[in-house]
Image (tube, rainbow, N blue to C red):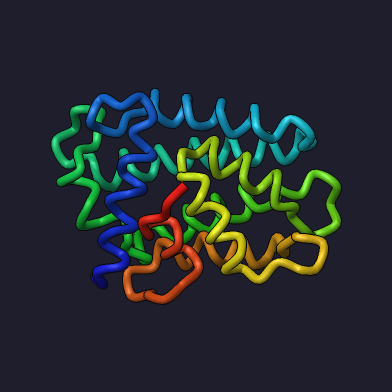
Amino acid sequence: MRTEAAKRVELVFSLFDANGNGVIDSEDFDLMTGRVLEAAAASDDGAKAAIRAAFRRYWTTLATELDTNGDGVITLDEFRPFVLDPERFGPTITEFAEALAALGDPDGDGLIERALFVSLMTAIGFEEANIHALFDAFGPDAEDRITVASWAVGIEDYYAPDMAGIPGDQLVAARAL
């Protein structure tokens, strides 16, 4: 696993631990789902249902694949070596990426405006300065929008253990606010 990917794993674990108890459990995914849906108030019911299903599948996949001792929680040690395994997590990541990116496009024009992007990423727990750096790395158009497809691919790349120099690395870079 590349150093960049290892940093991404650490960050994802800290974000998934939404209740801050040091482990990932189903409650964390409920909390994060609620925050993301609150940020996506303008999205239609289909997009909201898709992100709920994607978060649910994400938790189910993690619990099935990583909860090695069957205690209903995932520790960092359980999480770290396996989560960036495309064979095990690829379809789950793809579903999540497509659902989250679509949630950012409530008007269906294929474009995501910066304000909504920032709201959704903040709801997940990323730092605002890093969110703006990520958005900029996607190369927004003159009206400060990125494509749904670019964001979905960027999410998938974020979970690839062999990727470096990707837009998603902006999320783990230290930034001044």
Residue 58: % across, % down:
44, 43
Depth check: 144 or 49 in front?
144
Residue 90: % across, % down:
44, 61
Quarter of the rendering occupied by the N terminus: bottom left
Residue beneath the point at 48% across and 54% down: 130
In which image quadrant can residue 145 be found? bottom right
Q: Is residue 175 visible?
A: yes
Residue 16: % across, % down:
37, 38
Q: Residue furthest front?
A: 176
Residue beneath the point at 24% across and 32% down: 23
Depth check: 139 or 53 in front?
139
Q: In the picture provided, is 106 more to the left or to the right than 39?
A: right
| Picture layout, residue 141 above or below residue 33 | below
Residue 22: % across, % down:
23, 30
Depth check: 71 or 123 in front?
123
| Picture layout, residue 176 above or below residue 144 | above
Residue beneath the point at 66% across and 71% down: 139
Q: Is residue 103 visible?
A: no
Q: How many numbered marks appear?
A: 0
